[in-house]
Amino acid sequence: MVRLWLVLASARATLLADDECASDSCALHALQTRTLRKLEPVSDDVLFGHEADVDAAPVVSEWLAPALGASESLDDTLLGASPEVSYLPPSSPTSDLRVLKKENSLSPPSKATQYNGVAWPEMVFPGTGEMHVFTIGDWGGLLWEQYGDGTGLHVFPFIRPSCNINDMKQCFNETGDSTAPCNEACGYVAGVDNNAQVVVAEQMKKRAAKTGVQYFLNVGDNFYPQGMNTGCGSAMSQIKEATKVQFTKAFDWVYSGPLSGKVWLSVLGNHDYGARQFDYAWDQQVAFTWASDRWVMPALYFSQHVRYPDLGFDVDIFMLDSNVMDAHGLDERPGSNLCHRKYNVQADCSATGGPASVEQCAQWFSDLWNRQASWMEEKLNTSTADWQIAVTHFPCGHKLPWYSMLRSMGLDLLVTGHIHEQQLQFLPGQLTCLVTGGGGGITSERSPQGDDSREYGFFDLTLSKSAIKLDLVNHLGNVVLSHSIPPFSGHVGAPEVPPVAEKPQVPIEKTEKSQSGQSSTVGAACSSSALRDFVGQHVSISKEDCHKNTQKRACL
């Protein structure tokens, strides 16, 4: 038992110490170059996500500079803002949308945090046909009328290996130089990269028309680059014009047709708080729950019970806020820190239950996480549903010992995003984890070339009493990976070898050429060898053992 605790404590210490940043040139967590490696050879499709931001530029700061009306160079970003630059969120008038009490649900809250931990009213889906749930993340493109000249939905340009932000801007025709070519290293695919959100949505519509879909699991980064384009703290009874416009054009208009009226169970990503600061209008996304017939985010963390009476099973879904992963000290990681002093100028979200100042920011996110972690353990421990699913923004690997403990308590599936592609992973205790960050609001990690690309797309979950079937559907509509999750056996100490994913309908590329021309196995990895060793051990613990060590923080 002591040895097990030491392993868990060591792994947690490694996670806390590994801030994935070796210099001050860190970019936003969701705007980073990824180092892709392979872990233990347990399966060809087991990928472990890690964001290596050491080589990335402060992408959002560079991109936003023209919109701010000032030149913000790399030196400005790291050494201090130029006098002309303001990081205060823009103001917005109140729209004509009304916030109303919904039938059989709660009244609109007075603060965005009022209903934290609430059990949202049960959803019931009768019938004996297949029951489908789509997952999506990192999907909400920006609007040109808010951030540039012109109108329309625009994919946020991202850097790729050997392709910086200016290169990508040129591919998007944003530099003003019509004669310069698009750098081939960007792997830019016209019609896909510049239209990714709509391309993915169209494949969702086609699949929904064929299979049906009951609801969505949305893992956050709902609107790029900084969430709602106004500040936090407005009355929760008001929907701002910026909120209305963004939801109308980047949500309702895009996910229409067969997707209309389908509930989106949603959480916040780091971009929804403001990406490099915490005072953009994340509270408006909560308020919009009472102004929409399908957007469901009544709190920062909440649960949803879903019942399928004619098929004889039910599901408990736990929606979590993991943005503590991007909440650091006042002077740490500029551009990749919701709590950095530079960008949080006069920041105060206390009116809606958020941090009152930048000095309180990191502790606020830490307290939020600790409260919901205790809530999650209690809810999972008392759940009698056939299936338990957790949904959050940060990818497989964050808070790893804790999720391993949740697996021993019966958690069947973890759904995440933040990395801009689709991945299937198996975590310690054989917890199945999805990364579903290929929604297309931002360009993908790598080039979306090939019929078997996993960059842009979504997962289609087919729920039944006997299994949860996962289909990875890419932007071409190809199912490139399938896997089935059996019911949790309740046996502590899961098998050492995870189940092998079913053969995909389209061949999967197992290797990728490195810049040196050598073939290397593709997969995302953690930067720490100690953490890799920990993952490779497939540690599984009982809830009793974990609770005994709660005071030692071994379970977090």
Image (cartoon, helix red, strand yellow):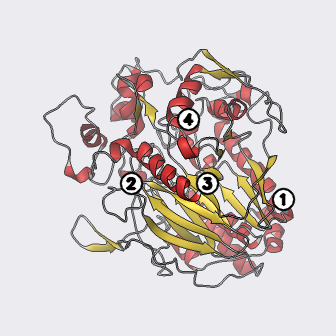
Determine the CA span between mark 4 and mark 3: 16 Å
Indicate which label's residue lies in the foreground, 1 or 3: 3
Residue 252's disc number? 4
Whichever of callouts 2 and 1 sits on the residue coming sooner in the sequence is 1
The answer to whether mark 1 and mark 3 are in CB contact below 8 A is no
Between the C-alphas of marks 2 and 1, the distance is 36 Å
Label annotation for residue 378: 1
Q: Are marks 2 and 4 in contact (CB under 8 Å)?
A: no
Is 178 above or below relative to 463? above
Q: Which mark is residue 445?
A: 2
Q: Name the mark nearer the viewer: 3 or 2.
A: 3
Quadrant of the rendered structure where residue 384 is?
bottom right
Q: Is residue 340 left or right of residue 383?
A: left
Q: Residue at x 34, y 56 (%)?
A: 448
Comes first in the chain, label 1 or label 3: 3
Find numbered disc 4 in the image and state the secondary structure of the residue it sits on. Answer: helix
Secondary structure state at the residue bearing disc 3: loop
Q: Position of residue 531 (x, y in %)?
A: 55, 69
Q: Is residue 342 visible?
A: no
Q: Which residue is mark 3?
A: 213
Does 527 sit left or right of 180 as displayed? Answer: right
In screen coordinates, is 81 left or right of 101? left
How far apart are labels 1 and 3 at the CA level?
30 Å
